[in-house]
Amino acid sequence: MALKPFGPIAWQFYNANNEFDLIMGPVGSGKTTAAAMRVMRHAYEQKPDPDGVARTRFAVVRSTRRQLNDTTIKTWRELFPDNEYGEFRETAMTHHWRFTPKGLGHAIDCEVVFRALDDAADKVNLLSAEYTGSYFNETREIDSEIILHMLRRVGRYPAGRCTWFGCFGDTNAFDTLSFLYEKFVLSEIPGWKLFKQPGGLDPCAENIENLPGGRMYYERAAAQLPPHESAIYVHNRHGSSRDGKPIWSSYTDTFHSAQFEHDRSGPLHIGCDNSGVNPAAVIGQKTHTGQWRIVGEFTGYPASIRLRCSRQSR
């Protein structure tokens, strides 16, 4: 399969060596290819054992078996065909490489296991095995407990001899209320890094040359998809939960959000909404020009009337 060079952000992600790297991009941006190729890079860069064999083991994780078969494994086998990398064992969902690459100087023994989280047996096997690293395909669909548990399973094969170990993943833009938004955007966790690609209609959009119709691919998608889906899959903007009815569906971080310091000498105001069972509150400050600046928000769901009253009284 002939591949053209990665875009700048995909290239940075491909070469990264953090504990947890995540690439977020629009559909068709080449992020999945970059992530899959990272498995190969880490396998090739693993230092060989005294017998001249570089051993690694990777888990490739998807939320459902159907998605794993229809998308993840299909892409994988196009990148790493059986006639070059050895037989893909469909029953075991494993691709085991055993060969000596030309010019490398030592042999590669890389075991890649594919696991779906909707299969109880797969899930048990995933969380009990020892790996060099793990690749989460469409990370926003993976439960946070799986991710945190997997971080404890990597770096354990080969025991004490991993040249690199960690997790990485690809994803479309995720929800502002999600675990990923909290950890990669709101927090600064050492060793966790988000690589955000340009939107599909951005002049610097990546992988355009590999898409049918080039930039028209995204222009058609933007015209056909509902606005909230276009924001995620075309423009690579963080979405918000579509449960219920969005109050401001055209909100975007890049236009409506800004960094500022509130006036510590002035009062802060709290606006509450106690209707229903999902109370919410915003904390803001009114400037001398009449502009309201919101500096924080709190939500509770589901919450009882007593809980709402106790929060209000505080």
Image (spheres, rainbow, N blue to C red):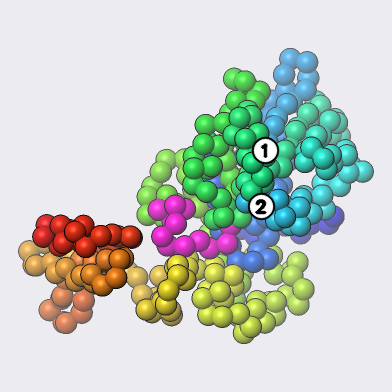
Numbered range of the magenta stretch: 171-182
How would you rate the neighbour count of disc 1 (Cα within 10 Å): few for under 14, some for 14-19, many for 20 or more? few
The local secondary structure at tag 2 comes to loop
Left-right relation of 72 to 257: right
Q: Is there any visible trace of residue 45 in the rendered image?
A: no
Position of 252 relative to 117 (above/below): below
Tell me residue 191's x, y (percent): 47, 40
User: Three-letter amino acid code at disc 2?
Assistant: Thr
Q: Residue furthest right?
A: 83
Q: How far apart are labels 1 and 2 at the CA level? A: 13 Å
Instruction: Name which residue lies at 64% across and 48% down.
Output: 118
Position of 207 relative to 61 (above/below): below
Instruction: Name which residue lies at 43% across and 80% down.
Output: 250
Nearest to the observer: residue 130 or residue 166: 130
User: Three-letter amino acid code at disc 1?
Assistant: Ala
Q: Residue furthest top?
A: 50
Give the mark nearest the N terminus, 1 or 2.
2
Position of 111 relative to 6 (above/below): above
Tell me residue 261's x, y (percent): 21, 63
Tell me residue 23's x, y (percent): 57, 54
The label number, if any, that marks residue 121 in the structure image:
1
Left-right relation of 37 to 232: right
Nearest to the observer: residue 128 or residue 167: 128
**Dividing the image into 4 quarters, which one contains the C terminus?**
bottom left
- The residue where tag 2 is placed is 64
